[in-house]
Image (cartoon, rainbow, N blue to C red):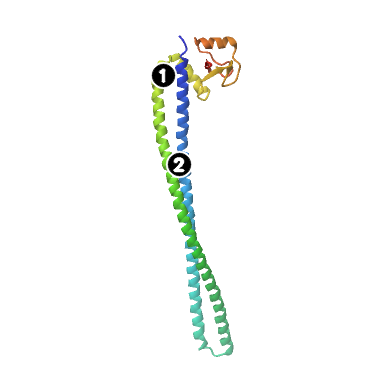
């Protein structure tokens, strides 16, 4: 029985295309994860800016509460001025009022600082929101393109599988068995063309007698070095 090189070569080409399509499909989940990660990162920038504003507002409320407490103490000290009986007590209360007022002035400066910082944070939030919106829009388009490619690749793989199923019955079973055995051992590359008396896969020289046998296509010959099925690559006229 002559070796069905034509169909074996076609089978090899189909398997290569199927493998390439499978690799593309296998990589799609990673691409989607990368897009989702970038979206989360853009949202985190907005979230962090809003948290910063919340912390700023809390700090300001705490400062304002402390000012109110100190002002209450000042009013209390002022009322006590009318009740003291000695100059020493009077002087002591005036000192307390003065020191308390210094604290109030310092805290009010901090409050103004927090208010100015809040203005900058609000600008930061607005900028982050705008940037996140642009990023999400772009990434959504990328995701849509990826899903489109995924559908195309799935359809292409299905067509290739159908062609392979139609081709397999045309090849002798013993040749299919050998093909499958080498396929699993050689990462899916089963056949190697011989060009200028060399195996093109491993570059080992093929003996002249083997070349003549390959030209006749009477039987399967394996490369003595890499173990792949050899076939003679005819020179174009």
Q: Residue at x 48, y 61 (%)?
A: 123
In the displayed structure, 162 sits above or below 54; it is above
Looking at the image, which is closer to me, 176 or 107? 176
Badge 2 local density, few (<14 within 10 Å), some, or many (20+)? Answer: some
In the displayed structure, 36 sits above or below 17; it is below
Residue most extreme to the front: 237
Q: Where residue 30 sits in the image (x, y, percent)?
A: 47, 39
The residue at which mark 1 appears reads as: 168
In the displayed structure, 154 sits above or below 84; it is above
Helix, strand or loop for disc 2 = helix
> Can you tell which mark lies on residue 194?
none
Total numbered badges shown on the rendered structure:
2
Q: Where residue 63 sits in the image (x, y, percent)?
A: 50, 70
The image quarter containing residue 100 is bottom right
Q: Where residue 107 sits in the image (x, y, percent)?
A: 53, 72
Q: Earlier in the sequence, mark 1 or mark 2?
A: 2
Q: Residue at x 40, y 34 (%)?
A: 152
Looking at the image, which is closer to me, 196 or 237? 237
Looking at the image, which is closer to me, 18 or 186? 18
Q: Where residue 184 sits in the image (x, y, percent)?
A: 50, 23
Badge 1 local density, few (<14 within 10 Å), some, or many (20+)? Answer: some
> Can you tell which mark lies on residue 32?
2
Looking at the image, which is closer to me, 38 or 139? 139
């Amino acid at each position: 029985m002559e070796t069905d090189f034509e169909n074996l070569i076609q089978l090899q080409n189909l398997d290569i295309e199927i493998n390439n399509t499978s690799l593309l499909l296998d990589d799609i989940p990673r691409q989607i994860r990368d897009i989702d990660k970038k979206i989360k990162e853009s949202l985190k920038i907005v979230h962090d800016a809003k948290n910063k504003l919340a912390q700023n507002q809390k700090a300001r409320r705490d400062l304002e509460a402390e000012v109110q407490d100190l002002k209450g103490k000042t009013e209390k000290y002022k009322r006590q001025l009318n009740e003291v009986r000695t100059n020493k007590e009077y002087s002591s209360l005036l000192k307390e009022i003065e020191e308390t007022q210094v604290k109030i002035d310092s805290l009010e400066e901090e409050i103004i600082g927090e208010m100015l910082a809040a203005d900058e944070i609000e600008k930061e939030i607005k900028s982050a929101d705008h940037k996140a919106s642009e990023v999400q829009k772009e990434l959504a388009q990328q995701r849509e393109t990826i899903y489109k490619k995924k559908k195309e690749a799935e359809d292409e793989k299905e067509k290739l599988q159908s062609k392979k199923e139609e081709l397999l019955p045309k090849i002798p079973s013993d040749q299919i068995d050998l093909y499958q055995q080498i396929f699993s051992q050689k990462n899916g590359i089963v056949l190697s063309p011989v060009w200028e008396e060399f195996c093109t896969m491993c570059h080992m020289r093929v003996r002249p007698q083997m070349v003549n046998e390959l030209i006749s296509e009477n039987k399967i010959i394996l490369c003595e070095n890499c173990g792949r099925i050899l076939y003679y690559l005819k020179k174009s006229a």
